[in-house]
Amino acid sequence: MKDLSTDELAELRESFDTCDSNGDGWIIVREFAALLLALDQDLTEDECLLAFEMTDADGDGKISFEEFMGWWTGA
């Protein structure tokens, strides 16, 4: 698990919130792909789908910031 500085955490939160197009606190697969692009992750569409499925810990079809952080930091 990688530790994030306060600035890194704030940057990730800002990127997450920017990609949360309707502001509901959740991102769907289309928004997740945009988030990964914003964070300079060069993934194919299939890789994005796989990463989304891995990140969506509860399988509800959407990702909270907490689920995203768990995936991003390897927690």
Image: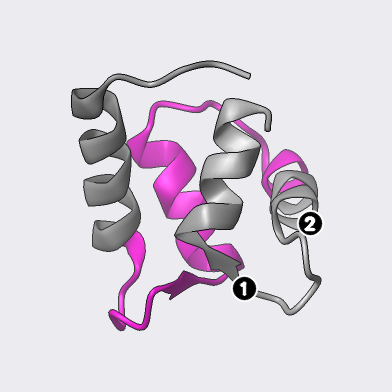
In this view, the residue in front, 9 or 60, is 9
Spatial CA span between label 2 and label 1: 9 Å
Seen at 47% across and 73% down, the residue is: 26
**Disc 1 target residue:** 62
Asked if residue 52 is positioned above or below residue 43 in the image, the reply reads: below
Relative to residue 10, is residue 34 drawn left or right?
A: right
Residues packed near mark 2 inside 10 Å, few (<14), some (14 to 19) or many (20 plus): some
Amino acid at circle 1: Lys
Q: Which stretch appears magenta?
A: 19-48
Answer whether residue 32 is magenta in the image: yes
In this view, the residue in front, 51 or 55, is 55
* Residue 61 position in % (x across, y down): 71, 76
**Disc 2 target residue:** 53
Seen at 27% across and 61% down, the residue is: 17
Asked if residue 68 is positioned above or below residue 29 in the image, the reply reads: above
* Residue 57 position in % (x across, y down): 76, 59
Q: Earlier in the sequence, mark 2 or mark 1?
A: 2
Answer whether residue 22 is magenta in the image: yes
Q: Classify the position of the C terminus by image quarter.
A: top right
Q: Classify the position of the N terminus by image quarter.
A: top right
Relative to residue 51, is residue 4 drawn left or right?
A: left
Snapshot quadrant of residue 5: top left
